[in-house]
Image: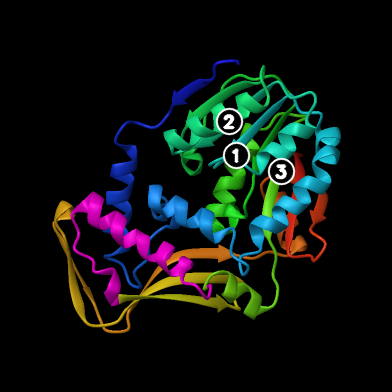
Amino acid sequence: MSPFLLTRTLPEDATGAALRADVLHGLTRAPKALPPKWFYDARGSALFEEITTLPEYYPTRAEREILVARAAEIAGITGAHTLIELGSGSSEKTRHLIDAMASLHTYVPVDVSESALTGAANTLLAHRPGLDVHALIADFTRGLALPGTPGPRLVAFLGGTLGNLLPAERAAFLSSVRGLLSPGDALLLGTDLVKDESVLVSAYDDATGVTASFNKNVLSVMNRELEADFDPDTFDHVAVWDRDHEWIEMRLRSTAAQTVKIPALGLAVDFAAGEEMRTEVSAKFRKEGVKAELAAQGLDLTHWWTDERGRFALSLSTPV
């Protein structure tokens, strides 16, 4: 089995510093808001894995369906020798792609979690000995320096995570990805599609309450990391469809007037009864919108695949 390289491009305290900055900014603004990346400690990641198995939550199954059906076609079109996966997590879905890429020499998973990267690399190397794996502990939303790897390269950003970024953030992200690509390289992008409101809301507000627990986990993260005294029982999970922006918003609604203390920040935060704090945006897309956003950043959408029910899309684009 080949060893794998693990490179840290984040300073040791980068995660803690980013959490403190995001909480200070997000809880002192109106309306209050936090970025969704703070759901994902060990418990939050486990809860999200459970969410992906729920009958209401279709995106993971729909994307996997496309990958299984189209991996060989994607491999043939790109001829990639290097696969770079942003926000790789467990790399579970990516194995369908890796299996189909006969010419693949190097896999570069990028994630903020060292444990996720190590687990995924060991699993992949057991499955495909001889593959060069160069894992990066990095935050891909803050600019990225990639190791030198053989081209052509395929950058994959799966799971619909693009939708968690606000429009200006999406533009900045796609611009940074375009800056990584050389002629002959390509971007494989996963996007959840606009569909019936009831289907969308159910996917983010399941009957068994797993998504509610996942949403409230951000409160537990702040309690543990910032010595805060949030009581999760005094917040309700809310999921709503914003028709104007065509995105789902997850929020936490305070059930009573309360003041939460966050000693690590020297902060006391007042919540009115019924006040909502946004914890996630999950934008849904249409093909023409994806094509326009890519084009604005110098990327040409060349291929578009959906699952049989038209719920989710994978697109391939190349630098102009």
Give, as a three-letter code, the residue at label 2: Thr
In the figure, residue 83 lies in which quadrant?
A: top right
> In terms of secondary structure, where does tag 3 sit?
strand
**Residue 113: image location, x then y, percent:** 43, 38
Q: Are marks 1 and 3 in contact (CB under 8 Å)?
A: no
Give, as a three-letter code, the residue at label 1: Ser
Which span of residues is magenta-colored? 206-234
Residue drawn at x 27%, y 50% is 20
Q: Is residue 74 above or below residue 311?
A: above
| Residue on which the image places disc 2 | 123
Residue nearest the viewer, comparing 167 with 216? 216
Provide the major secondary structure of the magenta segment: helix
| Residue on which the image places disc 3 | 188
Q: Count residues near mark 3 (Cα–Cα under 10 Å), then give few for <14, some for 14-19, many for 20+.
A: many
- 222 inside magenta stretch: yes
Q: Are marks 1 and 2 in contact (CB under 8 Å)?
A: yes
Q: Point out the frontmost of discs 1 and 3.
A: 1
Residue nearest the viewer, comparing 212 with 261? 212
In the figure, residue 28 lies in which quadrant?
A: bottom left
| Residue on which the image places disc 1 | 91
Q: Is residue 164 above or below residue 109?
A: below
In whole angstroms, how far apart are the C-alphas of marks 1 and 3? Answer: 15 Å
Q: Count residues near mark 1 (Cα–Cα under 10 Å), then give few for <14, some for 14-19, many for 20+.
A: some
Residue drawn at x 42%, y 54% is 44
In whole angstroms, how far apart are the C-alphas of marks 3 and 2? Answer: 23 Å
